[in-house]
Amino acid sequence: MSSGTQGNNGTLVVAGPDTIQVADFYVKASILRPLVIGSIAIIVLFTFLRFISNRSIAAMNVTDWIANVAIGSTLAGIVNGNSLARGMLGLATILGFQFLMSFIGARLPARHGWILSSPPIIIAFRGRLLSKVMATHRISLGDFYASLRQKNILDISQVECVFIEANGSFSIYTRKEVGTCEKVGVLMQVPGYKALCEDADTRIDALDDDKRKTEGRCDDEQNDVAGDAC
């Protein structure tokens, strides 16, 4: 409970454990210290991210994911009482590493891009699921159908291809979309899609009538082609 003394001008000067003191904002043991230190760290981080390239806040690959998690953890450590100087040095190290990786990745030849970023994984092709590829990469049917619903696709027969991108997001292209394009160079950059397209005519001719009528599943050969390409 607070105690008080009478001042010279008749005012009550309050002092005691319940009173907020100036030292409460910078003493490490104080409950108010995170308010000041955390605010400083957030302002510095915001200023840095605001005035550099938007690439630093993009989640495009594994390096970005690691950086985002590490930045959040480091910032939380600063707010919870870790050294401000050490924390800011840690943030600078994380952001510097991310900058270096993105700088190198932007200058790597396309054929070497897999070193820093995994290629997209194709999990559906021309109305059929690549079930073995999905099992290998631990993708459930529920996740797959949820991605179709988000794209307002009512039936898998409408799908030309579905990819899992390097950042874990789903990219979905319908047969209607692909059919209106004279060139599908963007899709042909994906090894799995290119391999399946090159093999498609021979593979379809080899299928018997029963397999042609099967919806939602690809045969073993298609799964192998897509798996090898990924």
Image (cartoon, rainbow, N blue to C red):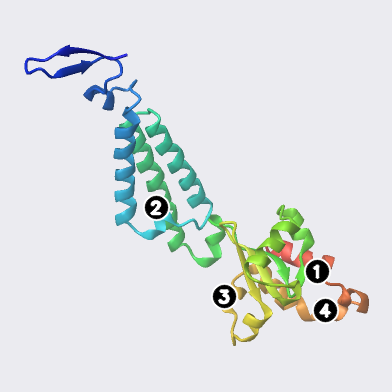
Provide the residue designation for mark 4: 204
Observer-side mark, 1 or 4, equals: 1
Closer to the camera in the image, 153 or 192: 153
Q: What amino acid is at disc 4?
A: Ile
The answer for how far apart the CA atoms under marks 1 and 4 are is 15 Å
Instruction: Give me the residue at 70% from left, 72% from top.
Output: 195
Q: Residues under labels 3 and 2: Cα distance?
A: 26 Å
Residue hosting label 3: 186
Disc 1: which residue: 216
Q: Is residue 70 above or below residue 124?
A: above
N-term-proximal mark, 3 vs 2: 2
Q: Nearer the viewer, mark 1 or mark 2?
A: 1
Horizontally, residue 131 falls left or right of residue 153, namely right
Q: Position of residue 48 (x, y in %)?
A: 31, 50
Q: Quadrant of the C terminus?
A: bottom right
Residue farthest front in this picture: 10
Between marks 2 and 4, how big is the CA–CA gap?
46 Å
Between disc 4 and disc 3, whose residue precedes? 3
Where is residue 191 drawn, in percent x and y? 64, 68
Kind of residue indicated by mark 3: Val
Q: Is residue 69 above or below residue 17?
A: below
Q: Earlier in the sequence, mark 1 or mark 3?
A: 3
Crowding at label 2, few (<14), some or many (≥20) Cα neighbours within 10 Å? some
Q: Residue tagged by mark 2?
A: 99
Determine the residue positioned at 74% across, 59% down: 133
Residue at 27 percent across and 20 percent down: it is: 19
